[in-house]
Image: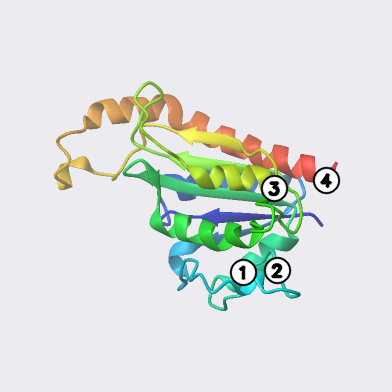
Amino acid sequence: MKKIVIIDGGPRRNMNTAAMLAKFAEGASQAGAQVTTVRLYDLNYKGCISCLACKIKGKASNVCKFKDALTPVLEEIAQADGLVLGSPIYFGDVTGQMRTFLERLAFPWLSYNDYSMTAPKKMPVLLIETMNGQPERNNSNGYGSMEHCIAAALGQPDHLYAYNTYQVRNYDNFELAGFSEKAKREWRETHWQEDLQKAYDAGKHMAEQIMA
């Protein structure tokens, strides 16, 4: 059975990013793929420590050699057939946990001999972003320079965005006067189910793509 690994870079189990990834998983599973979801906030791991163990002559590896809770995840991705990365956008970027994960994922791909990027295998990739920004007012850098690494090593990724998402379930309980809860609610009522359907459809599409 073909396998898709989902990386959840969001801190909250029941909010926007988690919901989008759950819908993707539902679509992929119903289309026949095996799906594994990993929550980065549940793991104790570090970013790249520049040990260069992945680049020792005669022992070079395109999977990170540093051992911690991220090791089995990176090894599983190396054998997967599809990859999904999901993160909320904080200060215009993916979460620190996602960025730290991407260091460990991508640095072993980079050759300092010729600056090529080589992953264990090519696979379809989907990048999901959930954010306060709107299509016409989007300050997100998304996955930034790491997207170029992903494209070079795995193949050009697809994208899925959920804009103007709810930050909390009850705005009355928080100092969030800079946001109009009414406007947020109206946007959500118009777009959220459509966003979830797009995530479901993306899961189905990736599963069908890798099983073709």
- Comparing 28 with 123, the one in front is 123
132 on left or right of 117: left
Residue that mark 1 sits on: 64
> Which circle, 3 or 2, is nearer the viewer?
2
N-terminal-most mark, 2 or 4:
2
Q: Looking at the picture, which amino acid does disc 3 mark? A: Leu
Which residue in the structure is indicated by mark 4?
A: 211
Question: Which quadrant of the rendered structure holds the N terminus?
Answer: bottom right
- Front label number (1 vs 4): 1
Q: Three-letter amino acid code at disc 4?
A: Met
List the residue tagged with mark 2.
61
The numbered dot on residue 23 is none
Amino acid bearing label 1: Cys
C-beta proximity under 8 Å, tags 1 and 4: no
Residue furthest out toward the bottom: 67
Instruction: Tell me the SS state at disc 1.
Output: loop
Q: Which residue bears the numbered disc 3?
A: 154
